[in-house]
Image (cartoon, grey):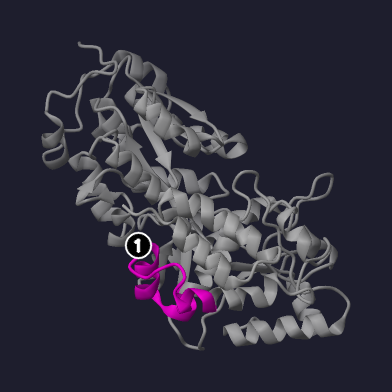
Amino acid sequence: MSTIRKRRLLLPLAAVATVGFALTACTGDIASEEAGDTDCSEYEEYGTYDGASVTIGATIVDIEADRLVESWTDFVNCTGIEIDYQGSQEFEAQIAVLAEGGNAPDIGFVPQPGLVQRLADGGWLIPASESVEANADEWWTEDWKAYGTVDDTFYGAPLMSNVKGYVWYSPSEFEENGWEIPTTLSELRDLSDEIAAAGDHKPWCVGLESGVATGWPGTDWVEDYVLRLQGADYYDQWVTHEIPFNDPGIVEAFDEVGEYLKNEDMVNGGIGDVSTLVTEAFGTAGLPILDGECSLHHQASFYETFWNPEGGDAAVVASDGDVFGFMLPPENAGDPLAVTGGGEIVVAFTDAEEVEVVRTFLSSDTWANNRVSLGGVISANLGVDPENASSELLVQSIEILQNPETTFRFDGSDLMPGAVGADSFWSGIVDWVTGDDTQSVVDAIEASWPSS
């Protein structure tokens, strides 16, 4: 019996991308022993690899990292492939430097398609094997597969997902006041005006602070409005710079969002005036809803995990609970549901067979159901049973992603070059909410777009 540890594939890389490898290997006594009472029937196709080890890096930390490691425990026990996961919030900023120095992990979970392109352009990524691509074709839509594709080369399948554009609210407050869930952007504005006119509290609470990434929650607002006001084709041309950042359609989206974020009558409920938007952490900004100090908060599905104020009881997230969410509505009643969102792409920096076995597993419906069942996250994998999700809102989010009528677009800033999406767009939002006019901000962002 041979032992595999970072063993190079016998096939050249070009062949890996087009031919793939058979998911079989040596039979290992060690793997069998570690499996113990684990039912390995779902993992037989992957073979066993005694002594093999794969390193993974990502931004996922704390309890989500613990759940991530738990999600592949049976796979590890049944295949014998040891997975060493290291999470760091600096992963995105460091991974290109690590790759250039030859110190990248075997696998990376990259949350920005724009960063995937940068890594591919640097020559650091390994094209995905046929097995990974087959899973991507079976379990993911063409749009999702495209986020892991650069210049017609498929580098990695998606992993987890999130749905952006939720408006969080208190169901009991809505019931007490007879408020209906808005079905159009105009109705949302009318509701906001009604709450503001009552004078009890500001309708919206907002937090844009996120360390070096301060401003990103504001980019989510703008992206949601661009998609709803201008449509998916326009959005696609915007994020690829076929339409300039200072186009009138983008100005319109900024100005619509500004009716909330730059308006003292609308924000910042339970926190302070407009200036507090850039100092309030995005993770705590929605909590005033629980105290009746604001009524509405714009944030993604992953915000569900933040409804647990320090020293207090966890809020119940449900349509009849303490807090729930509805999707930011379309411009016109009856328009198809259009949502933005995000996720991770599983890329490889090492061309070892065991690396591709791990990537194949992570792109499968088996892994997706494992992880979703552990709670707190969703996946756009079409093989996920929505009922495995840990809450009513996450079930709804999976159903949105799996609905063929949904128009889904990846977070725009994550698709843009880093100089824009992770720099000038974020800082531009800060400048904008603190006083700069829309045109000067979008002109500055346009000027920052790389020439090549």
* Residue 88 is one of the magenta-drawn residues: no
SS of the residue under disc 1: loop
Please give the residue where the numbered disc 1 appears in the rendered image.
240
Query: Is any atom of residue 160 visible in this view?
Result: no
Neighbour class for label 1 at 10 Å: few (<14), some, many (≥20)? some
Q: Nearer the viewer, residue 443 or 117?
A: 443
Q: Position of residue 391 (x, y in %)?
A: 60, 57
User: Magenta segment, which residues?
Assistant: 227-252
Q: Position of residue 83 (x, y in %)?
A: 41, 25
Residue projecting furthest to the right? 200
Residue 251: in magenta span:
yes
Left or right: 391 with respect to 233?
A: right
Q: What residue is at 31 percent from the left and 30 percent from the top?
A: 349
> Is 443 rendered above or below residue 89?
below
Q: Residue at x 75, y 78 (%)?
A: 174
Judge whether 428 appears above or below 253 on screen.
above
Q: Position of residue 45 (x, y in %)?
A: 24, 35
Q: Quadrant of the rendered structure where residue 367 is?
A: top left
Mark 1 residue type? Thr
Residue 252: horizontal and vertical position, in percent?
53, 79
Residue at 41% over, 78% down: 231
Q: Is residue 432 visible?
A: yes
Q: Pick the quarter of the image with the N terminus.
A: top left
